[in-house]
């Protein structure tokens, strides 16, 4: 990816499993639990999804889930590894927030691996969430099983 590449965001779209599945498959350090990944790919098809394209090629996505009128979740997201750290995640989130804000959503949550787990990939993921405004709210030690402590993060988006 070159610094002058223009990132185009489209969405929300439904039925994007075939487009987003390969991105999750390209991120085995983050999506290495087969059963969970299959479920994510299936869920993407039914959730409002935003795609990031560079020269028409999809390079990243975010899918969101509405839980309540005022609360939504950044449910699953990924960017191809060779495109990390070029502003694609930030651009996707800006479009997601605009979409949710228009519907009156006030709080956006995301669940990720907690820092009580030493995984280096997820340390980068948490650095991304922190940089784009999410803050740790609570750790759930057993929600995903004791081997994968879950951190709930939240961002006010109004
Ligand atoms: C998390 C992810 C979607 C972020 O997308 P991205 O396009 O790489 O992120 P951006 O380039 O928009 O980063 C925005 C800011 O986040 C922070 N950030 C992102 N990656 C970072 C890293 N590896 N280390 C430290 N800070 C980081 C930086 O502050 C960055 O801004 P800067 O580059 O101007 O300093 C992407 O890295 C990814 O696909 N990760 C693997 C899958 C994953 O973690 N999914 C979520 C599971 S819960």
Image (cartoon, rainbow, N blue to C red):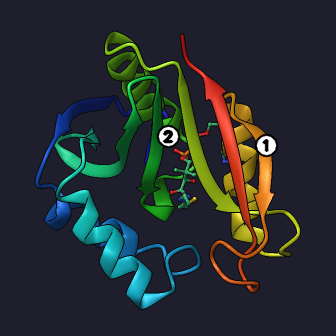
Q: Which structural element holds mark 1?
A: strand
Asked if disc 2 and disc 1 are in contact, CB closer than 8 Å, the reply is no
Residue at the spot 74% in from the left edge and 86% down from the top edge: 147
Vertical comparison of 93 with 129: above or below: above
Is 45 left, or right, of 124 in this rendering? left
Vertical comparison of 120 with 84: above or below: below
Residue at the spot 31% in from the left edge and 80% down from the top edge: 38
Quadrant of residue 104 in the image? top left
Which percent across, then down, holds residue 137? 78, 42
Which percent across, then down, holds residue 116? 88, 69
Tell me the tag on residue 89.
Answer: 2
Residue at the spot 23% in from the left edge and 70% down from the top edge: 42
Quadrant of residue 69 in the image? top left
Among all residues in the image, which is located at the extreme left?
15
Q: Between marks 2 and 1, how big is the CA–CA gap?
A: 19 Å
Tell me the tag on residue 65.
Answer: none
Vertical comparison of 58 with 86: above or below: below
Which percent across, then down, holds residue 100? 37, 22
Name the residue carrying label 1: 136
Q: In the picture, which quadrant includes the C terminus?
A: top right
Choose between 1 and 10: the one closer to the eye. Answer: 10
In this orientation, does residue 11 appear?
yes
Which percent across, then down, holds residue 82? 48, 61
């Amino acid at each position: 990816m070159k610094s002058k590449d223009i990132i185009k965001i489209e969405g929300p779209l439904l039925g994007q499993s075939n487009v987003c599945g390969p991105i999750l498959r390209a991120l085995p350090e983050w999506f290495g639990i087969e059963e969970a990944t299959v479920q994510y790919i299936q869920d993407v098809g039914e959730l409002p999804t935003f795609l990031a394209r560079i020269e028409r090629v999809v390079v990243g996505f975010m899918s969101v889930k509405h839980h309540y009128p005022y609360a939504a979740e950044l449910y699953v997201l990924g960017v191809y590894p060779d495109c990390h750290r070029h502003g694609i995640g930030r651009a996707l989130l800006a479009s997601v927030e605009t979409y949710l804000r228009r519907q009156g959503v006030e709080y956006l949550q995301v669940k990720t691996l907690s820092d009580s787990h030493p995984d280096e990939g997820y340390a980068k993921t948490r650095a991304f969430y922190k940089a784009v405004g999410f803050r740790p709210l609570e750790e759930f030690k057993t929600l995903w099983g004791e081997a994968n402590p879950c951190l709930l993060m939240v961002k006010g988006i109004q």
